[in-house]
Image: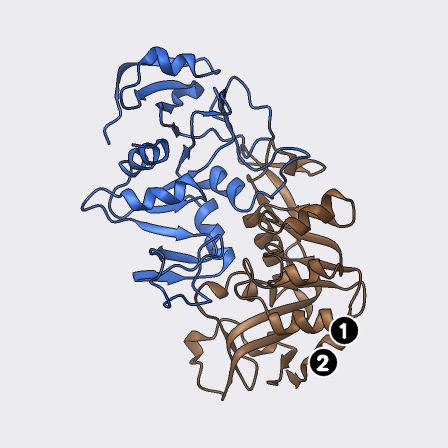
Amino acid sequence: MQTASLEKCVAMIPDGASLMIGGFMGVGTPERILDEIVRQGKRDLTVIANDTATPGKGIGKLIAAKLLRRAVVSHIGLNPETQRQMMAGELDVELVPQGTLVERIRAGGTGLGGILTQTGIGTPVEDGKQRIDVNGTSYLLEVALRADFALVQAFLADYLGNLSYALTARNFNPVMAMAADTVVVSADNIVPVGVISPDHVVTPAPLVDYLVANA
Amino acid sequence: MDPQTIIARRIAREFRTGMLVNLGIGIPTQVANHLPDGIHVFFQSENGLIGTGSVPDDGMAHPTLTDAAGRPVTALPGASTFDSAMSFGLIRGGHVDITVLGGLQVDQAGHLANWMIPKKMVPGMGGAMDLVSGAKRVIVAMQHTAKGASKIVKKCTLPLTSVRPVDMVVTELAVIAFPDGRATLRETGPGISVAQVTAATEAKLALADDIREMAL
């Protein structure tokens, strides 16, 4: 794990990169990193995340700045601008049931090719997907997801990169921290090793590549 | 009593102490305000919380303690938090005793459509498909009609949320269950006759032997 400035961490992200971004309606989203992505004007991004938050918050900032080419998300209902861009054909949106989305990411991070779920059978979600019967029950094959970068928000990060999370700000963060080639973490608090006891480490240090330094 | 209160109060009577319950947005959220005395359930928010409490007092909200709509909530004593994989493992794995969801249409086989109106409203399904596919019991909370048209239809014209039939629909006019895949009128709303329910319903309703008025 390396510590690096916010500017340097975001400069590593090329135009056209795929990003997993933690957070649920902007709660547990690394706002500082997203603000810097907007400032550096990254283009043609693919974002994999639960939702696109609301205008002006979290991923909503990237939507407003029109930095996305594609979004893989479960919900866009509270961001009218995402819906407008989708309807206008400016943004490609893949809507994925939330449980399927997180499980596809988990599969991507844990060496699995995909998962089998009953969710989505007989709905538009099934289009183009393979059905697999196991012991008399039909499931959809949902393939694993990975990304070039995971942008993670933690509550505590120690000097080695061990992470813990706060309340409902955990959500997709620890799952995404396993499913990307490069994991960049922003933390509410950077603390000495030992402050997070081993039982309370949620994301172990070897998973983290870069910790964004305090300003 | 207004329609939403009738629906919320009736559904709250399905809860038993110790159940794990997930409430959707809209009328379902109001069910939490009508728990009968002495009934204590665990409310799950699918963003990663069991033990969801009421809205915090002014000035007491915390930015990392929110419900599935991103609004500030409180956590009750005994609450727990977890990641989204665990949250949906609970949902798909049948650990949620009851989910209460809003609906756009329910058909006479119990199929629910509640996540999109093609070309008009495409908000995304969020957790709805997982909840309907995986919860032990699915209860739909919705008004009986929209703009005069029955929301309980012969066959859903909107895209389905799941092919798994729901267990019960509660409106201000009726409680409808789906034994053997057939919409069956079980209870009528306060002061509402069976004839009034069937007249307001597009779906063909079977009539239970012992139809009674909702106890609220």
CA gap between label 1 and label 2 equals 9 Å
Q: Residue furthest bottom?
A: A192
Q: Locate residue A55 relative to residue B198 in the image: left or right.
A: right
- Mark 2: few/some/many CA within 10 Å (<14, 14-19, 20+): some
Q: Where is residue B101 drawn, in percent x and y?
A: 44, 38
Left-right relation of B18 to A25? left
Residue B25 falls in which quadrant of the image? top left
Q: In the structure shown, which secondary structural element does the residue marked by tag 1 occupy?
A: helix
On whether disc 1 and disc 2 are found on a single subunit, the reply is yes
Which chain is indicated by disc 1?
A
Q: Is residue A29 left or right of residue B71?
A: right
Residue A19, quarter of picture: bottom right
| Position of residue B170 measured from the top left corner of the image (x, y, whole percent) | 37, 29
Task: Determine the chain carrying the residue at label 2.
Answer: A
Q: Which of pointers 1 and 2 lies earlier in the amino acid sequence?
A: 2
Q: Considering the numbered disc 2 on the image, is that residue within a helix, a strand or a loop?
A: helix
- Between A125 and A36, the residue placed more toward the observer is A36
Q: Is residue B149 above or below residue A141?
A: above
Q: Amino acid at mark 2?
A: Glu
* Position of the N terminus of chain A by quadrant: bottom right
Q: Which mark is drawn over residue B84? A: none
Q: Amino acid at mark 1?
A: Gln
The image shows a total of numbered marks equal to: 2
Provide the residue designation for mark 1: A40
- Residue A7's tag is 2
Q: Position of residue A157 (x, y in %)?
A: 53, 80
Q: Colour of chain B?
A: blue
Is the residue A118 above or below the residue B18 in the image? above
Q: Name the colour assigned to chain A in the rendering.
A: brown
Q: Are marks 1 and 2 in contact (CB under 8 Å)?
A: yes
| Crowd tier of the residue under label 1, counting other residues whose Cα lies within 10 Å: few below 14, some 14–19, many 20 or above | few
